[in-house]
Amino acid sequence: MSRVTCDLTISLDGFVAGPNQSLADPLGEGGELLHRWQFEEPESNTDALKGILAAGAYIMGRNMFAGPGRWDEDWRGWWGEEPPYHAPVFVLTHHPRKPLEMQGGTTFNFVTDGIESALTQARAAAGNKDVAIAGGAQAARQYLSAGLIDELRLHIAPIVLGAGERLLEGVTNLNLEPTEVSGTRLVTHVRYRVIR
Amino acid sequence: MSRVTCDLTISLDGFVAGPNQSLADPLGEGGELLHRWQFEEPESNTDALKGILAAGAYIMGRNMFAGPGRWDEDWRGWWGEEPPYHAPVFVLTHHPRKPLEMQGGTTFNFVTDGIESALTQARAAAGNKDVAIAGGAQAARQYLSAGLIDELRLHIAPIVLGAGERLLEGVTNLNLEPTEVSGTRLVTHVRYRVIR
């Protein structure tokens, strides 16, 4: 059966986004600094970047697909007509909607009956490949708390945000084992195996 | 001039101690799990452990020396008659006290005129060796916030404490650059250079 992975970039003080997130500033104040490693030194982080997009199916939360206030039938995601997933994406939502087929192999499927149903559908779609929880942090917390993630890959940016959305707030009973560490001047990559 | 270093073990969610710290439970609930790497696999962490005790002089906060409610002239620290420092230790306090000479080269000196004075004295005592901020977290935060630390060495335990004392709470304007990463199944070591 395919593994369930989850990649997230966090600040050294544990935030996935800075304070005062909004439609105009979805990562919050200072939050864009979290992702400097992806944009400023992609050639030094090829393995980590490839890993993020290596899954056979993806699951994402409603806010990652649509952000606040963007929930209408015309909204086609943040990624343009050819999203980078090139695979089925299952979006957790309370609003039924027909599948949305994009270019390049990405289809957004809208799942209204919960995280376990989304995972079952994603596993079926992924074949032998992994299923990735693509974010945001709330979806990741739900899957972590339910014990449904096999590998958590944190990308720790060397910045202190001081406030914002904490990745691990309220997540308990999480037993992790680091299996690989690497990094650059802008990020520390740590792979964790989730121990059950 | 000698560098100023600081080693701290933190949980993945940023705590240096669990909730409900007390004299009987100075690391708080679950806090002892932070330090498993030091006790269960010292042979796999020799470089990190040596680094913690490589300085020519140490600075520590009052709580690290005495804990809550242990401030009297008879108190000789937590480390027995031969503490592991083997060097001068400068203890930040508001209570004047004569220097306390222990066996093996450790002398506790009590500094009542602030963190900069303690650092000046520690630099003079350290010679060409580093000065280490030995803890606790409050003292580390004070020195970090004042821009007086050159290298922060975090030892990130793969556990989630959920509550307790946060290392970086209230520390702002901290610019860090990871310079080295390594680890085992119980800890991830990251060295950060503090950028000014």
Image (cartoon, coloured by chain):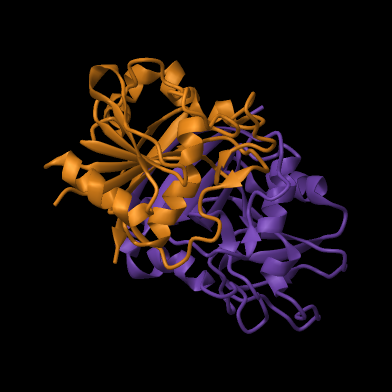
Chain colours: A purple, B orange
Q: Position of residue A178 (x, y in %)?
A: 48, 34
**Residue at (35% x, 33% y) in the render:** B98
Out of B50 and B91, give the one closest to the viewer. Answer: B91
Residue B149 appears in the picture as rendered: no
Out of B116 and A194, give the one closest to the viewer. Answer: B116
Q: Is residue B24 left or right of residue A86?
A: right
Q: Position of residue A127 (x, y in %)?
A: 63, 43
Out of B56 and A10, give the one closest to the viewer. Answer: B56
Count every numbered label the image shows and give the total: 0
Q: Is residue B163 left or right of residue B78?
A: right
Q: Position of residue A148 (x, y in %)?
A: 70, 39
The quadrant of the image that shows the N terminus of chain A is top right
The quadrant of the image that shows the C terminus of chain A is top right
Q: Position of residue B36 (x, y in %)?
A: 50, 23
Q: Is residue A112 left or right of residue A61?
A: right
**Residue at (28% x, 50% y) in the render:** B119
